[in-house]
Image (cartoon, rainbow, N blue to C red):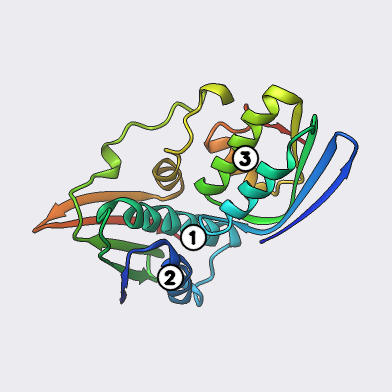
Amino acid sequence: MTIEKSSNGDKLIIAVEGRIDTKTAPELESELNTSLEGVSDLTIDLAKVDYISSAGLRVLLVAQKCMNHQGTMTVINANDDLMEIFEITGFTDIFTIK
Amino acid sequence: MKELDITAVKDNLDTVMSFVDEQIEDIDCSPKTQMQIDLAVEEIFINIASYAYNPETGNTTVRVEVDKEIPAVKITFIDHGVPYDPLAKADPDITLAAEDRRIGGLGIFLVKKNMDDIKYEYVNGSNILTIVKDL
């Protein structure tokens, strides 16, 4: 998994590439932990993610909870398979997905 | 039928995934099915690695059987840790708002939703969890 960050003022885009699983999710979590201060508009780009397990969902949920206090979070470019995982787990009602 | 006997620790996840993927690689299954199988294998193996022998470590056997007639793949996980029926746990409430959602608890739920059959038995000191995915 690789993570690419681009920020502009209080906007932050985090583009993830690869698999978000038990072994890689902690890396994404620590990246988010250290990047969200002062951010009010977070976008998570999943265009190059082809796999997410509950460990990854957990990290996205933590980010959503954090952003609920300080702004908005948008998940973009999730493929059909990821969308199905989000639907099964009710995350389509939690995330703003575009 | 192929079996892998391996120490149930998180660091062995990639080895388990590769083993399972090798067994099903010559079957014509969609990337989506492949992802669903990987997902189930990860969630179950990590569950065993996290809870079965905690705080000690122990082994788990991963058995993969492919039935090309049906066609379906059956994967069995056997550990000798504390008796634990993951299917007995209530499903998470997926209608709650983010603030009220519990962190975790989604793993086995995803397995249930993505597999065609799932069965748990405790026999002679062994937890035996079997999942079946139609191909």
Question: Which quadrant is the N terminus of chain A positioned in?
Answer: bottom right
Query: Left or right: where does residue B61 sit relative to residue B108?
Result: left
Tag 2 near tag 1, CB within 8 Å: yes
Question: Where, by quadrant of the figure, is residue B90 drawn?
Answer: top left
Q: Secondary structure at mark 2?
A: helix
Q: Residue at x 36, y 51 (%)?
A: B47
Q: Which residue is mark 3?
A: A60
Rendered position, A65 above or below B60? above
The x, y position of residue B40, in whole percent, is 43, 54
Lower sequence index among marks 2 and 1 = 2
Disc 1/disc 3 C-alpha distance (Å): 20 Å
The x, y position of residue A67, in whole percent, is 70, 29
The x, y position of residue B131, in whole percent, is 34, 55
Q: What numbered label is drawn on residue B20?
A: 2
Q: Which chain does the residue under circle 1 lie in?
A: B
Q: Residue at x 22, y 46 (%)?
A: B84
